Image: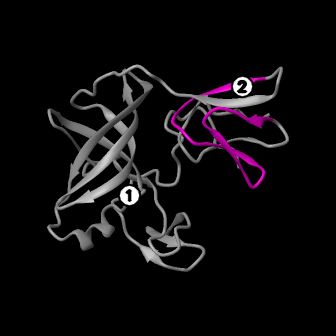
Amino acid sequence: MEQLKDIVFPGDIIAKEEEYVSGKNTQDIDGDVISTAFGKVARDDKSLIISVNTTKQSIPLRKSDIVYGKVIKLLNKEAIVLVSGFIREGKLIPANTETRIRLPIPNKTMYSHILTLGDLVRARIISTRPSYSTIFEGGLGVLKSRCTVCRNELTLENGKLVCKNCGRVEQRKIAPDYGNINILGDNHERS
């Protein structure tokens, strides 16, 4: 039997509609129950409801924490990332904070080859006041991205990001494990 994920990101498939009814922080889409929040999966096997519990506690980020989040805004020379979780002492901890990434290109229209809105990224905190992070180190970068034209998910083929829908080829500063946000390594995404 396939092992289910305990910690999920928005957009992760956490069950099939035949298995569970969607609960808190989930949504039914095309026969799948999809997470709409970052958090821990809660399964009620008696009433067959599946939910995602988010954390209310606020744990401050520290320098060198590895963070996971989504690019929510591009400014002049910076990207703002909404941090959904971070790794500390080998554990994934849910979060709800922002960090900035300095971008080396001074023209906002040229950012799309590094980052674009909606990209899911892994970054490392380099300062906490104000919070800045970087994706320009080994193991860091974009984990999932969408086509800037049709918004379908980009897949990695021969080192290039390709849209299966419209055929567009795009560039990003991608992480070595692009397309696989199975962060902890011991759970498997459902297909």
Q: Secondary structure at mark 2?
A: strand
**Colour mapping:** one colour
Up-down relation of residue 175 to residue 111 (above or below) = above
Question: Where in the figure is residue 93, as x and y percent of width and height?
Answer: 43, 26
Residue 153 in the figure: left or right of residue 45: left
Q: Which mark is residue 43?
A: 2
Image position, residue 124 (x, y; %): 28, 39
The residue drawn where x is 32% and y is 69% is 113
Instruction: Give me the C-alpha separation between circle 1 and circle 2.
Output: 33 Å
Q: Amino acid at mark 1?
A: Ile
Q: Which residue position holds label 1?
A: 174
Q: Nearer the viewer, residue 70 or 88?
A: 70
Left or right of 100 on screen, residue 145: right
Q: Residues within 10 Å of mark 1 (few under 14, many from 20)?
A: many
What's the amino acid at mark 2? Arg
* Helix, strand or loop: magenta stretch: strand
| Residue 73 position in % (x across, y down) | 31, 55
Q: Is residue 23 depicted above or below 156 in this figure? A: above
Structural crowding at the residue carrying mark 2, measured as other residues with C-alpha within 10 Å and reported as few (<14), some (14–19) or many (≥20): some
Q: Is residue 91 magenta-colored?
A: no
In the image, what residue occupies the spot 31% across and 43% down?
A: 123
Compared across the picture, whether 49 is left or right of 38 comes to right
Mark positioned earlier in the residue sequence (1 or 2)? 2
Seen at 41% across and 73% down, the residue is: 170
Q: Quadrant of residue 46?
A: top right
Identify which residue, 137 or 18, lies in the foreground.
18
> Element at badge 1?
loop
Q: Give the number of callouts.
A: 2
- Image location (x, y in percent) of residue 72: 36, 52
**Magenta-drawn segment:** 20-44
Judge whether 171 appears above or below 54 on screen: below
